[in-house]
Amino acid sequence: MRGFIYFLPGHRDLAINNAIVAEYGGEDLRSVLRGLKPAMTQGQGPDGAHGVLVTHPDVEPDMRRCDAASQEWRKAPGHRYWVGMWREAPPRAAELLRPGAELVDGLPVELGGQAWLVPVARRWTLVEDSPRWFPALETTLEMDDEGEISSGDVVPRLAGLWLDAQAVADDIFNAENSDGQIALDPREQFKRCVRVLATNYRLGIPECNLLKILTTANIADVLRTLVDLEGMQAITNALVKKNSGAVA
């Protein structure tokens, strides 16, 4: 298996815990390591300092090292850790996929020549000849006094994804932006795309920087998929044909 290599400069113990993760990378590092019992090797990092190299346990043993001449490295923005990969063997989407129980249903979007499963937070249906959206994420269930069941809040682990979906939808569907374009600041678009992809994959900003999978041409595709813009457009187009009497 190919994978990313994480370097913790100055760390010497072949062990990692929540305190160490918080010290070196906070939530960003915790997210990519969550649920793993990583392989750890002492050695030199890309900055020349001594420390510990951390990898997915399935990464080949001879690839769990720093070789600056054959690798690309990025320092995690705002953190102490580094992320690297072998130039001739970059991690593939399938190798970064989270366990099945954590995956959020979505649609494939091509990024960097590979299909990535982008979660869909909102989907569309037809209600009284009008497109209506509904939450597509896991929610809690609630029962009222009459015994009726209704959906409650989005479950906590997906709350951040839901907030991102609401912000993107507000931007796309607001009255001053009816053409479906995304007017978010480019930096915010990038960060949102990374968070969306990180729902189903073990990656963050430095990993996306290394893989170079986000471009000016595809960055909006991820956000449009998040709110199922194509689904809404398909329903709208069908309504137009129906109302015009055209054959669908």
Image (cartoon, helix red, strand yellow):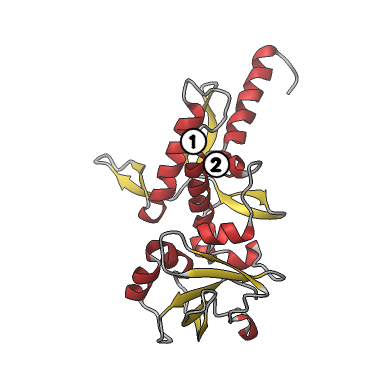
Question: Observer-nearest residue: 66 or 110?
Answer: 66
> Measuring 61% from the left and 70% from the top, which residue is drawn there?
85
Q: Whole-percent x and y of residue 58?
A: 59, 79
Extreme residue in the top direction? 244
Q: Quadrant of the C terminus?
A: top right
Helix, strand or loop for disc 1: loop
Q: Amino acid at mark 2?
A: Leu
Helix, strand or loop for disc 2: helix
> Measuring 34% from the left and 70% from the top, which residue is drawn there?
23
* Few, some or many residues within 10 Å of mark 1 (<14, 14–19, 20+): some
Q: How many numbered discs, if any? A: 2
Which residue is under mark 2?
Answer: 223
> Measuring 35% from the left and 43% from the top, which residue is drawn there?
149
Q: Whole-percent x and y of residue 62?
A: 64, 85
Which residue is under mark 1?
Answer: 184
* Few, some or many residues within 10 Å of mark 2 (<14, 14–19, 20+): many
